[in-house]
Image (tube, grey):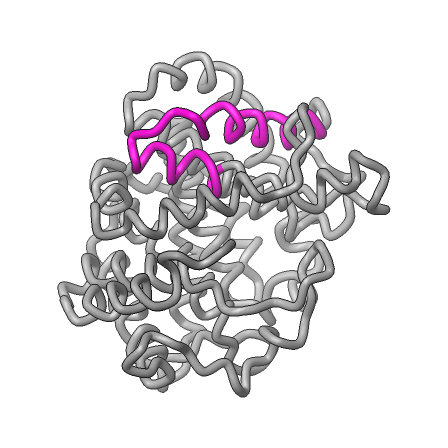
Amino acid sequence: MILGRRPFAWLVLTLTLGLPAAALADPAALWAALRDPVLRPVDQFRLRQGWAEPRTPDGAIGAAALWVQGKAKAFYLDEQRRGTDFFLQPSLALGETAGLAPGISTIDFGFSQMGPDGSFSHIPDVTHATEFFLEGAARALLLLDAAHSPLAPATGARWRPQLSKLADWFLRPEIAEGHPDRDLHPFTHRYYARAAGLAEAAVVLGRPDLARAADHYAREGVARQRADGVNPERGGFDIGYQVAGLLYAEYYAFLCADPQLKQSVAAMSGRALDFLGTRTDAGGAVAAEGSTRVGKEKDREGVTKKINYAAYAQVLVLGSKLTGRPEFEATAITVMQTQVEGHAP
């Protein structure tokens, strides 16, 4: 059987027939990497992004806030991961507290839309939306725990049962693998989003079965990389999603308890960053020409997708730590100085 073509058959065996469970990783290394002072400009930029986002008092953000306000036709659950990206993670890394409450309320709002069985069947683009919300919520709880935040115990007591239900629901065959040619195969970054989210959930829930499912998606992602370092998106190269996929892959790698697989993901990251380096000039600007999605598609709020330089700087720093290659961090510093610091969200 070729696992890349029938991944859910493998997951069923893992989750229901009692195959040996993967070990659970210690999140300390990921937490230490994310609060490295070199990333301070990235965290400050993301907080500015968060405060600039449209939000509602009950926690909806971005396009989801527009839906609550009656300005959009659909609720996009994946928007709620911004509570982690724009508030919780940067606030915890910087040792600030003002962004913690809005970050938590943003994840709370996402969970408030969930059915009692963990389902989100009523939302559009359900597979894409749930895999990204799962990752954002799991990472939020992992970081609150790792930072020993005083908000972690109460938040964890509220979120853990919901997160466990969501993970189980997402891994149902009709959700995770119902339409793989539409929802998964064209998008390498989604393999890594699943790997990261399931690994993070495994740690905070104490569920080795989820870690094993995460390992599977990571292996599938690595196998998709081209010889030139490109992780394909819609059949070609895309600068934005090369970065997005690397970010999730690196989150996963820090949590991977399998040394061989961790090294495989780290090597993939090095090759992918080398390719990005061929498109990055001495001033830290990246050439997006030839991308399959950036500059062509629009996001949930109708804005044309563009290069996320804060994310690029972060993947360079994390990639430097995973590969032991200091030149990646040097490039990150240039990118932050020229493309992130002082720039409006």
Rendering quarter of residue 146: top left
Let me know if residue 337 is in the magenta part: no
The percent coordinates of residue 325 (x first, y second) are: 15, 68
Q: Nearer the viewer, residue 193 or 147?
A: 147
Numbered circles on residues, count: 0
Res. 201 visible in picture = no
Q: On the picture, is 91 further left or further right than 190?
A: left
The percent coordinates of residue 323 (x first, y second) are: 19, 64
Span shown in magenta? 84-113
Q: Residue at x 25, y 41 (%)?
A: 35
Let me know if residue 107 is in the magenta part: yes
Rendering quarter of residue 331: bottom left
> Which residue sits furthest front?
342
**As displayed, is residue 310 above or below residue 166?**
below
Q: On the picture, is 324 further left or further right than 172?
A: left
Q: Nearer the viewer, residue 258 or 127?
A: 127
Q: Residue at x 70, y 60 (%)?
A: 179
Q: On the picture, is 176 further left or further right than 329?
A: right
Rendering quarter of residue 265: bottom left
Main secondary structure of the magenta stretch: helix
Q: Residue at x 81, y 45 (%)?
A: 74
Res. 20 visible in picture = yes
Q: Residue at x 50, y 23 (%)?
A: 101
Q: Nearer the viewer, residue 302 or 226?
A: 302
Q: On the picture, is 133 further left or further right than 3?
A: right
The percent coordinates of residue 145 (x first, y second) are: 33, 25
The percent coordinates of residue 253 (x first, y second) are: 30, 53
